[in-house]
C-alpha cells in the first residue's frame, strides 16, 4: 500500500503493509521510546521507518536505537516526506512498517 497522502486530522500515524492506523501514540512528545513501538513491532518487521516530522524535530534516543539493533531491526529515520518515499521504495522487498510524525 503506497503511502504519502494523509488527512491533517491526526499528527501521528503507524503504517503497516496492509493498513494505516491514526492512533499511534508516544510516551514523550518528540522523543521515541521503545514502548512507543509495541504495535509496530508486533508486525515483526525487518525494517522500521520513522518519519521525524516535516522539520525532523522528533528525536530517537540511543537507547531506542540500541533496542532495535538488539532485535535485528533495521532503522531508517528521516523527515516524514522522505520516510514515505522510503516506505514505498522498500515495501515490496522487505517486511516494513513506519511510524510517521506529520507535524514539526
Image (spheres, rainbow, N blue to C red):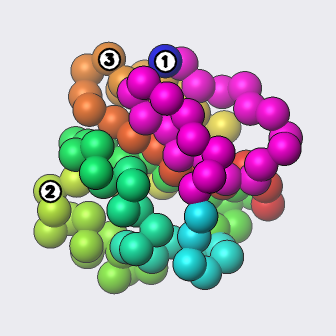
Residue 28 percent across, percent down from the top left: 61, 81
Q: Which mark is residue 72?
A: 2
Examine the structure image and report whether residue 23 is included in the region drawn in magenta.
yes
The numbered mark, 2 or 1, whose residue comes first in the sequence reads: 1
> As drawn, is 54 to the left or to the right of 48?
right
Is mark 2 in CB contact (under 8 Å) with mark 1? no
Residue 91 percent across, percent down from the top left: 37, 24
Q: Which mark is residue 92?
A: 3
Q: Does dot 2 land on a helix, a strand or a loop?
A: loop
Tell me the residue at 39%/55% (across/down). Answer: 39
Q: Which mark is residue 1?
A: 1
Residue 38 percent across, percent down from the top left: 36, 62
Name the outermost residue toward the right: 8
- Magenta residues, start to end: 2-24
Tell me the residue at 37%/73% (across/down). Answer: 34
The numbered mark, 3 or 2, whose residue comes first in the sequence reads: 2
Q: Please name whichever residue, 8 or 81, is drawn nearer the observer in this view of the structure.
A: 8
Residue 1 percent across, percent down from the top left: 49, 18
How far is mark 3 from mark 2, CA to CA?
Answer: 19 Å
| Residue 86 in view in this figure | no
Examine the structure image and report whether residue 87 is included in the region drawn in magenta.
no
Amino acid at each position: 500500500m503506497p503511502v504519502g497522502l494523509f488527512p491533517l486530522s491526526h499528527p501521528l500515524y503507524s503504517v503497516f503493509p496492509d493498513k494505516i492506523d491514526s492512533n499511534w501514540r508516544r510516551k514523550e512528545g518528540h522523543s521515541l521510546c521503545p514502548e512507543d513501538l509495541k504495535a509496530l513491532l508486533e508486525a515483526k518487521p525487518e525494517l522500521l521507518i520513522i518519519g521525524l516530522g516535516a522539520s525532523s524535530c522528533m528525536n530517537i534516543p540511543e537507547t531506542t536505537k540500541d533496542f532495535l539493533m538488539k532485535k535485528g531491526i533495521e532503522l531508517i529515520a528521516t523527515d516524514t516526506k522522505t520516510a514515505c518515499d522510503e516506505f514505498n521504495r522498500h515495501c515490496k522487498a522487505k517486511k516494513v512498517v513506519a511510524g510517521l510524525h506529520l507535524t514539526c
